[in-house]
Amino acid sequence: MAQETSQLQVVTELSPPHQTLVAGQVDGYSTQLVKAILQQADIVASIEIYPWARAYKMALEQPEILIYNMARTAEREPLFQWIGPVASYRLGFVKLAHRQDIQLKTLADAQQYSVAVQRHDVAETFLKKNGFGQPDQLVVAADISESWQLLLHGKVDLIIDDPMALTAMAAHFNIKPEYVEFAFAIEQLQQQTYLAANKAMSAEVIKNLQQAHQHVAASTLYQKVMRSEFDGIIPVKNKQI
């Protein structure tokens, strides 16, 4: 019998192609891995999408909450229990392709432009620590969809995203992928991101999930998702945001 509890919940943010909504259900490549881990652990849990700041707060404060995709930073290390990686990101600046006036060779080159970031996201913390602290320079959004809207409507010059996400986001906003451009990779933000749990979640459940993650990590699906080789694996249909 699966371990089914009304309290256990998995939260995440919208972040195609890893976390998407399909017909009202959370889907995406990382979501497929999380579902496989839960199934292997014989655990039934709901998965819900929230703005990142809200999802983070829930996982921080509520003992029966799991969260993904969480960057494993030094500041966060003692705050959560870490199950295992479920995605790999190469984050950097994204601009509108016609903005040829924006040419980025270094991180410092971007300091003259406005940037949309998600609240409590690792990119917000990183940019604040690296000189992006001028008034109105960082525009804080609730989620990646809002950041994209700010970019597409000319409210900011740059956003932070993964190059593998551009096609999925362009399809949602009904624009050609060529309309946007990955302008500069931020080396310090290249990372694997994790499925993590509230600090108070029981040791038995954590051990079960960690063992399940090890099993799933041996699968072809896991290896392809972690290498961002999305062609030929479980499709993510008609992404809705």
Image (tube, rainbow, N blue to C red):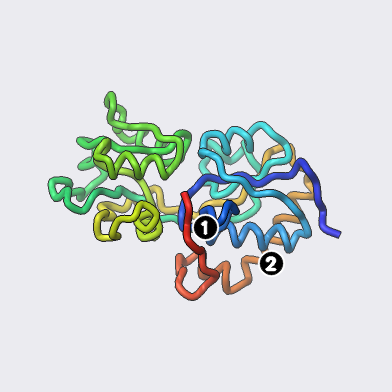
Q: In this view, does 206 lie to the left or right of 90?
A: right
Q: In this view, does 102 lie to the left or right of 36?
A: left
Question: How many marks overall?
Answer: 2
Residue at 52% of width from left, 45% of height from top?
13
What residue is pinned by disc 1?
87
Amino acid of disc 1: Ala
N-terminal of the two: label 2 or label 1?
1
What residue is pinned by disc 2?
215
Q: How crowded is mark 2: few (under 14 residues within 10 Å), some or many (20 or more)?
A: some
Give the CA distance from mark 2 to mark 1: 16 Å
Q: Considering the numbered disc 1 on the image, is that residue within a helix, a strand or a loop?
A: strand
Q: Quadrant of residue 149?
A: top left
- Residue 234 placed where, x, y %? 55, 70
Q: Residues within 10 Å of mark 1 (few under 14, many from 20)?
A: many
Residue at 76% of width from left, 41% of height from top?
7
Amino acid of disc 2: His
Can you name the residue that lies furthest to the right here?
1
- Residue 105 placed where, x, y %? 20, 50
Q: In which quarter of the image is residue 152?
A: top left
Whether 13 is drawn above or below 23: the answer is above
